[in-house]
Amino acid sequence: MPTSTYQGLDVLYSHAQIGARVAEMGAQITKDLKGEKLVMVGVLKGAAIFLADLARALDAEATFDFVAVSSYGKGQRSSGAVKLIKDLDEPIEGKNVLIVEDILDTGLTLAYLRKVFLQQHPKTLRIATLLDKPSRRIEKIDADYVGFSIPNLFVIGYGMDYAERYRNLPDICLMSPDHPE
Ligand code: PRP
């Protein structure tokens, strides 16, 4: 495994590896759209970087919207307490919607968003996640497009944080339990 040049963090997926995978995902999504328009819905904040890159890997007309869900901490999230704290700006009825996530973990966030969005009757509703941790699933939900399936590792960078830090690292890195604050 290569070692990052910054802060002594180990790189799980380099920016180049991510770029290659995102290009493949973009090509598949473009193909599945069959020339139709897309509304990309990013889940703040972690998905922001992935959405920006995935959008540019599409050969399709795409608009952006963003939602935010309550983050009471993973402990309370595991109790199922997911709440929308920033709703969609525009209605999605009759539209092709792609929820864009950085990571699919317990599935509580996406199961909640899927339920709420389906109530608006989009034409299609699909999910793209850069990372998937299937071993962590509580809610039965799968993404339509998965960048990388990983074991239960604490990952940071490329949008993902530890206490709001590291989101701007270009690579996806591993946060080791003994990493200095
Ligand atoms: C992360 C991630 C997903 C959610 C997935 O968000 O971006 O939204 O957790 O977890 P789940 O499948 O267990 O629901 P986080 O709460 O870390 O907020 P952030 O995106 O602002 O970093």
Image (cartoon, helix red, strand yellow):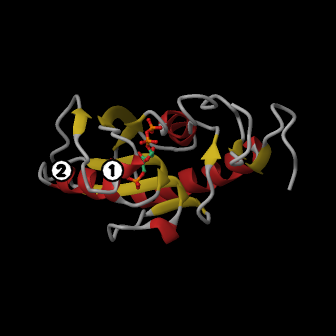
Residue behind label 1 places its C-beta within 8 angstroms of ligand 1: yes
Q: Is residue 34 visible?
A: no
Residue 75: horizontal and vertical position, in percent?
38, 51
Task: Identify the residue shown where x is 26% and y is 55%.
Answer: 80
Quarter of the displayed picture in which ligand 1 can be seen: top left
22 is higher (above) or lower (below) than 159: below
Task: Identify the residue shown where x is 68% and y is 45%.
Answer: 175
Q: Nearer the viewer, residue 109 or 162?
A: 162
Residue 49: horizontal and vertical position, in percent?
55, 34
Task: Identify the residue shown where x is 23% and y is 38%.
Answer: 84
Instruction: Report the Cα–Cα distance between label 2 and label 1.
Output: 17 Å
- Which mark, residue 116? 2
Residue 111: horizontal and vertical position, in percent?
28, 59
- Which mark, residue 103? none
The answer to whether the residues at label 2 and label 1 have Cβ atoms under 8 Å apart is no
Which residue has dot 1 on it? 77
Of the numbered discs 2 and 1, the one sitting upstream in the chain is 1
Figure quadrant of residue 142: bottom left
Secondary structure type for disc 1: helix
- Callout 1: few (<14), some (14-19), or many (20+) C-alpha neighbours within 10 Å? some
148 is higher (above) or lower (below) than 158: below
Figure quadrant of residue 79: bottom left
Q: Which amino acid lies under the numbered mark 2 shown in the image of this protein?
A: Val
5 is higher (above) or lower (below) than 22: above
Q: Nearer the viewer, residue 44 or 147?
A: 44
Q: Is residue 49 left or right of residue 174?
A: left
